[in-house]
Image (cartoon, rainbow, N blue to C red):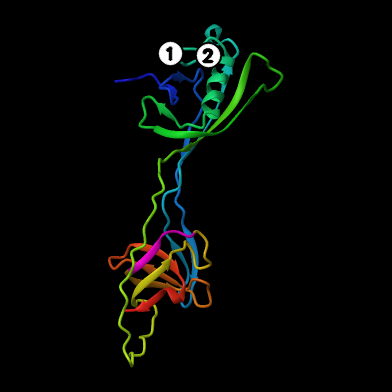
């Protein structure tokens, strides 16, 4: 069992360094992109969002000559503080993700370097103080979605009047989904999708919030984008 607590950074070339002095604390920030909406006769409701990217901030010091100091915690050291600064700056400028691993814990995070600040404090020139901010990296790729041509429908001479649409109605959706009723956060486009209306925001640009038939949230759509089944 590994009993050495170390903070390790590995770059895109699989080169690894251990930070010379362990920070006094480490916090991993995890949150979701929840949104609030006001619904008539119900009041404010919370729409559960997807997980946001995790963030980690590391604050510590780097001695100018790490191998001569007694308070370092790393098992393996670089020759100078500038070597650590150059390594981190090089990884940041490459704009490639790195990996943070903290031994004796389950923390292993693939991330990008969102910021790196360093300097000297309190008039002491024997070490650098620094703050290293990391943000989780999730690989993704854009895919072009083709739109299928729908066969022409035969129009009846005297169509039946459409049913009223409201909360709880099962509807057919053809349109762009949004994160909220004001049209923020446009997402995917529904094509002849059978959905159910779970929330209604009268007077809004996108007044209907639709879900799948088994309750999975989809998004907000225009009134003209839905029709009754």
Instruction: Indicate yes or no whether the magenta region holds residue 84.
Output: no
Where is mark 2, residue-wise? 71
Q: Residue furthest top?
A: 68
Q: Where is residue 24 in the image (x, y as percent from the top left)?
A: 51, 27
Q: Residue furthest bottom?
A: 158
Which residues are drawn in magenta? 186-192
Q: Where is residue 83 in the image (x, y as percent from the top left)?
A: 55, 15
User: What whole-number distance in Å separates the C-alpha atoms at marks 2 and 1?
Assistant: 12 Å
Q: Position of residue 39 (x, y in %)?
A: 47, 73
Element marked by disc 1: loop
Judged left or right of residue 168, residue 81 is right
Residue 200, above or below 163 = above
Residue at point 36%, 90% (across, down): 161
Residue at point 53%, 67% (across, down): 182
Q: How crowded is the residue under tag 1: few (<14 C-alpha within 10 Å), some, or many (20+)?
A: few
Judged left or right of residue 64, residue 158 is left
Residue at point 37%, 29% (across, down): 105
Residue 84, above or below 178 = above
Q: Position of residue 149 (x, y in %)?
A: 34, 67
Q: In which quarter of the image is residue 141?
A: top left
134 vs 158, nearest the viewer: 158
127 vs 99, nearest the viewer: 99
Residue 120, above or below 192 = above
Q: In which quarter of the image is the C terminus?
A: bottom left
Q: Quadrant of the N terminus?
A: top left
12 vs 124, nearest the viewer: 12
Q: Quadrant of residue 10?
A: top left
Element marked by disc 2: loop
Where is mark 1, residue-wise? 75
Q: How many marks?
A: 2
């Amino acid at each position: 069992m590994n009993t050495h607590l170390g903070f390790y950074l590995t770059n895109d070339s699989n080169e690894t360094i251990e930070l010379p002095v362990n920070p006094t604390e480490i916090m991993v920030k995890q949150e979701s992109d929840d949104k609030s909406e006001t619904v008539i006769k119900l009041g404010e409701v919370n729409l559960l969002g997807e997980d946001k990217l995790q963030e980690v901030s590391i604050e510590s010091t780097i001695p100018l000559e790490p191998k001569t100091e007694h308070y370092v915690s790393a098992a393996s050291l670089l020759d100078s503080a500038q070597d650590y600064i150059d390594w981190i700056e090089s990884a940041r400028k490459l704009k490639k993700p790195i990996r943070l691993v903290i031994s004796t814990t389950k923390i292993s995070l693939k991330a990008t370097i969102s910021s790196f600040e360093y300097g000297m404090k309190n008039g002491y020139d024997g070490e650098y103080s620094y703050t290293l901010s990391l943000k989780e990296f999730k690989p993704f790729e854009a895919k072009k979605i083709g739109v299928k041509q729908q066969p022409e429908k035969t129009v009846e001479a005297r169509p039946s009047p459409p049913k009223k649409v409201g909360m709880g109605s099962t509807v057919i959706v053809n349109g762009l989904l949004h994160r909220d009723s004001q049209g923020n956060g446009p997402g995917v486009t529904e094509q002849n999708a059978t959905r159910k209306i779970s929330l209604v925001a009268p007077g809004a640009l996108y007044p209907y919030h639709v879900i799948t038939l088994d309750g999975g949230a989809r998004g907000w759509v225009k009134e003209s984008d839905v029709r009754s089944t």
